Image: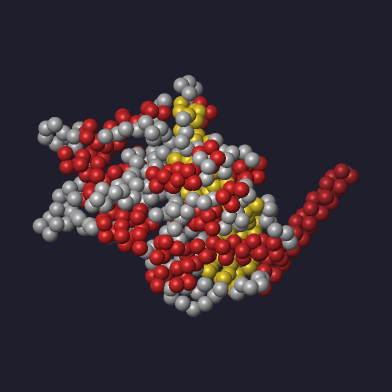
Amino acid sequence: MSFAAKILTLVSMSLFTIALADTACAADRCDELKNFTLSGTAITITRAEEVAAGPPPPPPTPNPASPSNITLPAHCLVEGTINPRKGTSTSGIGFAVALPDNWTGQFLFQGGGGLDGVLSPPIGANAAGNMPALARGMAVASTDSGHQSKGGFDASFFADQQATLDFEYNSIGKVTEVAKAVIAAYYSKPATHSYFAGCSMGGREAMIAAQRFPLEFDGAISGDPAMHVGFSGIGDRWVRTALLAIAPKDDKGNPVSAPFSESDKELVISKLLDACDDRDGLKDGMIFNRKACKFEPKALQCTGPKTDTCLLPEQVGALDKAFAGPRGSDGHQIYPGFFYDTGITAKGFIGGLLEVGPGPADPSLPAETLDFDKQAAEASANPAAQIGDTANWTNMSTFAARGGKLIFYHGTSDPWFSAEDTIQYYERMESANGGDKAVQNWSRAFLVPGMGHCGGGNATLDRFDLLTALTNWAEKGKAPESVIATGKAFPGRARPLCAYPKYAHYKGSGNKDDAKNFRCKD
């Protein structure tokens, strides 16, 4: 063996020995966290162990926009309970923190979903493109929000006062405090930057993070936020009631077939695209220019007998009523309407608005007529919803002043929470904080054409990396004018998602599937 080869072998052996020592050191430091305590807070650590590099565990609820073929780095996984106690469907606030060996110094709090109640693996995949936060080397925390659920929409915990308070807002603050302390104890230094990212209920929690804990987070990503849960439920029931009212019934009044046949739904999508698709400079099966989309169902109304090329007057009327959103008997808008979009006929776990069968959040079909005035009054008087309200709080002065950044995104085909509701909140926030130009210094909103609830859709690009956009904005001062989106629905296609109110417009030449040939246009 040559002298150079011997030197190379010795160096390789030394590096291997150092790596083994580092691994053993990390395992020792992880094991020490079994005895972690925090003054003033009762904590029970139930797990603290090294996890080898490998694929992520499956999430409790699959998300079609989640990346695949990801390898997570070796990390210390800590699980425990904050303020353990005995109560109704709760034993305290469950939490988990993943501490990667290749730590970047950043911390991400991962939001939940449904009515929480499940301790999801802390990975941080939401709006992170193909690279979850943990795979990037960020420390990631998750929580069950203070109760243990029997299902994604198990609401029995509301009978317990503390569990309700924890779910509505308190768990965000508590887990943030504990997770930051765990991080500092493990790495012997605090996190340099702290973020929150979530969709649906996690999107509401991201708003809670920015609204109620403005000193704790440098940035937050709020996707399809469940900010109006009681009222959004009314919106969904309004749509289904309006559509089922025209469905053929049996002698007991139960629907025996859908109000729209498959050919009817294909017709609606076809005419919708005829009216709106090319308003962004390109006919490509996607609607980017929402402002210019003026689709009117009455253009489909039959002038004679029903055929596959037209809709009956009652079908046209049902569409108009459903998508306009619920109104009270005095005409006031109870909840915003929904966009006509390509995902309204989507099938799957969460079907589009024209798929009027039972859904995971509301398995029963509504009655043909409902008292929406009464439902709105009950939603307004719900004390739990008032405690956790995020839709009416717009004072973001402290968060903005210290450099916090807040990014919203919402699928325009979301059948659960109207994208219009998020846009209306964003515009109210602008009005309350110095106007659009001032707010765009610290907040941006992105509409995702065709995307359903937090992902999926017949014609959408639902894979995008807002996490990099957020960290670059918070740490480097680079505001996101757009972010590139791809998706399974259109292999090989990429488009920019532009910060609201701009939209992606084709420049008129070049590869139509290449994002660089589009510009953000007012």
Q: Nearer the viewer, residue 223 or 25?
A: 223
Q: Position of residue 135 (x, y in %)?
A: 61, 51
Decide if residue 304 is in sight here: yes
Q: Position of residue 21 (x, y in %)?
A: 77, 61
Residue drawn at (17%, 42%), measured in percent from left and top? 314
Q: Nearer the viewer, residue 309 or 289?
A: 289
Q: Nearer the viewer, residue 27 or 213?
A: 213
User: Image quarter for residue 35?
Assistant: bottom right
Q: Position of residue 416 (x, y in %)?
A: 36, 51
From what the image shows, is residue 113 above or below residue 410? below
Residue drawn at (26%, 56%), measured in percent from left and top? 372
Q: Is residue 189 left or right of residue 226?
A: right
User: Image quarter for residue 439?
Assistant: top right
Residue drawn at (37%, 64%), measured in percent from left and top? 382
Q: Residue furthest top?
A: 509
Residue drawn at (44%, 53%), measured in percent from left and top? 392
Q: Position of residue 84 (x, y in %)?
A: 54, 75
